[in-house]
Image (cartoon, rainbow, N blue to C red):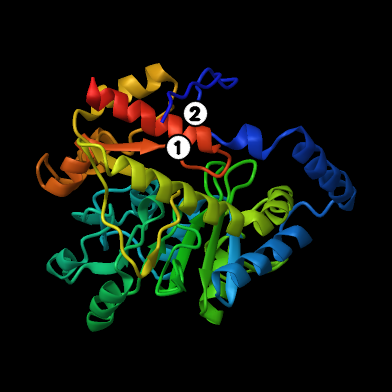
Amino acid sequence: MSRIDLPPQPNGYKVQWSYLPKQFSADNIEEILDLFRKFVPTGDFTLGKPVAEFEGKFAAMIGTRHAIGVNSGTDAIKLGLKALGVGPGDEVITTANTFIATVGAIGELFAKPVFVDCTDNFCMDVSQVESRITRKTKAIVPVHLAGQMTDMPALMEIAKQHDLPVVEDSCQCILGNIDGRNSGTYGRSGAFSLHPLKNLNVWSDGGMIVTDDDAFATELRQLRNHGLAGRDSVVRMGCNSRLDSIQAVVGNWLIPQVHFITDTRIKNAAYLDSELSKIPGIRLPQRFNNRKLVFHLYIVFAERRDELVAHCKKAGVEVKVHYPVPLYQQEGLRQYGYKKGDFPVTDRHAATMISFPAHEHLTEQQLAYTVQTVKEFYEA
C-alpha cells in the first residue's frame, strides 16, 4: 500500500476525535434552527410536546414500555437508584473501571460504591460480584463501557438469587445488545446519556431512563419533576432533572440516524480490528459473537502506550486514553478506602489502553492513515 498523507482538519489534526463539526454542518444547523423557529413560539419549554415525542421514539428504539427524559446520564443513574430507596449507609456494587459519573450518582445518595474488577472487554467481572454482597448491599450497577456489554444474563442470575435490583449504566452503550436483547432492558431501569459525544446526542447534557415497570416509571417521572404528581400536589421529595424541550427537538431530529451511526461505527471498528491486529505491540480486547458492540469508544491495548499516544498526536491522529488514572485511585474517592493494586486488571488497562477515532464521519483514507501511523511507530 502506498503511503497516505492527509490535509489537517480545522483543529490541526488529520484524523480528529470529535465528529460534531461534521454532524452539525452548516446545512444541518439550518435544518435544526428551522425546527427551533417553529417550536419557540409555542412556549412549550418545560416537559413539552417534543420531550414526550422523543421519549416515545427512544422507548420504541430500545424496546421498553417507558423512557423518561432527564437532564443527564448521571441523573438517569441516580434517579433509578433513588427510586429503589438507595440512601445513606447502603452499598451499591459497581465496576472499578468506569467514568466518575457512575460513582458520583451513587455518592450523591450518600451510599457507598463497592467495586469489582473488570475483564478484558472493560466491563464488570461478574464472577467477582457475589463475594462483594453484604447485608448492606442495596443494588448493583453494571457499566456497559465503551459500547461493550457486561455479561448481563450471568449478572441477572446472581441478582435474582440475592433479590437485588439492577440499574444498568448504559450511558456508553446505546443499541448494544446480547443475543438481540438491548442494553438497558435487563435491569429494573437503564440509564442513557445524550452528551454531545455519545452515539445519540443533543446540544448539551441530557439523559434518558428506560423501564418496563409502569409504577416505577411513574415514580421516576415524579422524581425528575420536584416530586410533583400534578401542578399542586407534591407526593415525594424529588429534584429538577427535566430534559429540556429544546434539546428534545435536537434529539427528535437525530434519532432516525442512530442505526446508521451504529452500523458505520461497527464497520469502521471491524476494519481497525482487522488491520491493527496484524501489528505486533497491539492486542485487541475480548470480542463476543453473540454481543453487538456499538463502539462509543474504539479501544485496544498497546505496548509502550504513552509513546504511541505521543507519536499518533504528532502525526495528526487525535487519540485519547480512557482512563489513565483508575477511578478507585482518584483523590476524590479516598474515603472509600481502596488502595493501588486492589484491582489489577483495571490497573493494567489504565496503563495499556488507547482509544482511536472510529466515528461515522471518518473516511476510508483517515482510517487507513490511522493504521499506517500505528505501523510506523512499531516498525521504527
Q: In this view, does 218 lie above or below 38?
A: below
Residue at label 2? 15
Q: Distance between the residues labelled 2 and 1?
A: 7 Å
Task: Identify the residue at image location x=55%, y=74%.
Answer: 63
For the C terminus, the image quarter is top left
Q: Residues within 10 Å of mark 2 (few under 14, many from 20)?
A: many
Q: Mark 1 points at which residue?
A: 357
SS for callout 1: loop
From where the camera sits, is residue 207 visible?
yes
Contact check, label 2 and label 1, Cβ < 8 Å = yes
Specify few, some or many for label 1: CA neighbours under 10 Å numbering under 14, 14-19, or 20 or more: many
**What amino acid does circle 1 point to?**
Pro
Front-lying residue, 231 or 142? 142
* Residue 91 image point, x, y percent: 25, 62
N-terminal of the two: label 2 or label 1? 2
Which quadrant holds residue 147?
bottom left
